[in-house]
Image: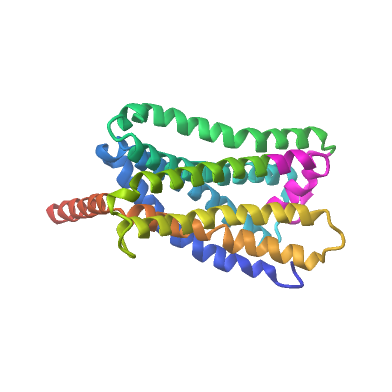
Amino acid sequence: MQRWHLEFFFIPTTVLTLATLLANPVLLTCIILSRALRQETRYLLVANTLTADMLFLVLNLATAICNAARAQVPWLICELVTAVTVTTYCCAILTVTLMVVDTYAAVRWPLHYHDILPPARTHRILVGVWVLAAIYPFTLMIIMEMDRGNPREKVAVCLVLLSLGFIQVNNVMGIYIYFFVAALICAILIFFCYIRLYMVTRTQGIWQSRFSRARVTLLAHGVLLLLYFVPGFVFTLELFMFQRNEISQDVRVWVSSVNMGVFMLLPRVFAPYLYGLRGSFIWKRLCKVILKLREGLRLR
């Protein structure tokens, strides 16, 4: 990393993180302050995605800064950061998948939609998503810590690839099965929902125009889903290359740096602007909040 000056990857990481953190808190504030938005399942899912993304970005930025400063951190802290980072990434993937399922349920059963997914049930589902995303990474962390001889041992560079790569030595199939099965289930659900949505709505004329709202929305969501899933598959490839000595170390380090510093941040940059500012309702709410703040300042 020092020979290639890869510590400078913290610059695009910082820029992309700040661009995301400018929008996410604003949208979260609008959702939290608006009672109408808090009653909508889709906006609760958006809020959960934005929360998971912000946690991921903060941890990723802190790791990048520590690596650039060549600060040594205890293995326990690095493993904890790794577990939380994997949890937030998986939680975002699961929540984005649930957003597609939510759209399918709203179109497929419009009369019973609010009975199927009331806000209270949505809250329980989101808690279950966090628990499901956290079980495997934290289990691996606990196993790794129990097997470690020196709990105060420090690591020169903290990377998710290194933490999971060393764990992978004794749990190769477990890690591959976890990532592959999770990604496969999410992909099957997404494809099924979109195919069924097209079959249900194709006779309603919303797909006739080349630039219809349905086509544009599907394209935008498809691109965002692709941006969310591709870095996960690249990371699985990184884990595979980690144990392959015939692959150049430079290639492995470059792939890891680009994936963690750029690819994994792109969907988080686009998500708030696509799911938040693109929606007219939440945009109107944001304008109302700004107007109220301005009126309050004038009265003072």
Q: How far across and down, in percent of the image, does residue 255 sit?
A: 69, 63
Q: Picture coordinates of residue 291 (x, y %)?
A: 18, 54
- The percent coordinates of residue 69 (x first, y second) are 67, 62
Indicate how the structure is coloured in the image: rainbow
Q: Nearer the viewer, residue 163 or 170?
A: 170
Specify the segment rendered in magenta. Answer: 150-177
Q: Is residue 163 magenta?
A: yes
Outermost residue to the right:
246
Decide if residue 114 is on the left or right side of residue 261. left
Please identify the quadrant where the N terminus is shown.
bottom right
Q: In the current view of this chain or complex, which residue is farthest to the front?
A: 203
Q: Residue furthest left?
A: 299
Residue 162 sits inside the magenta stretch:
yes
Where residue 290 sits, quadrant-wise, is: bottom left
Q: As drawn, is 60 to the left or to the right of 218?
A: right
Residue 172 vs residue 211, the one in the foreground: 211
Residue displayed at 26% across by 54% down: 280
Q: Residue at x 61, y 43 (%)?
A: 184
Picture layout, residue 160 above or below residue 270: above
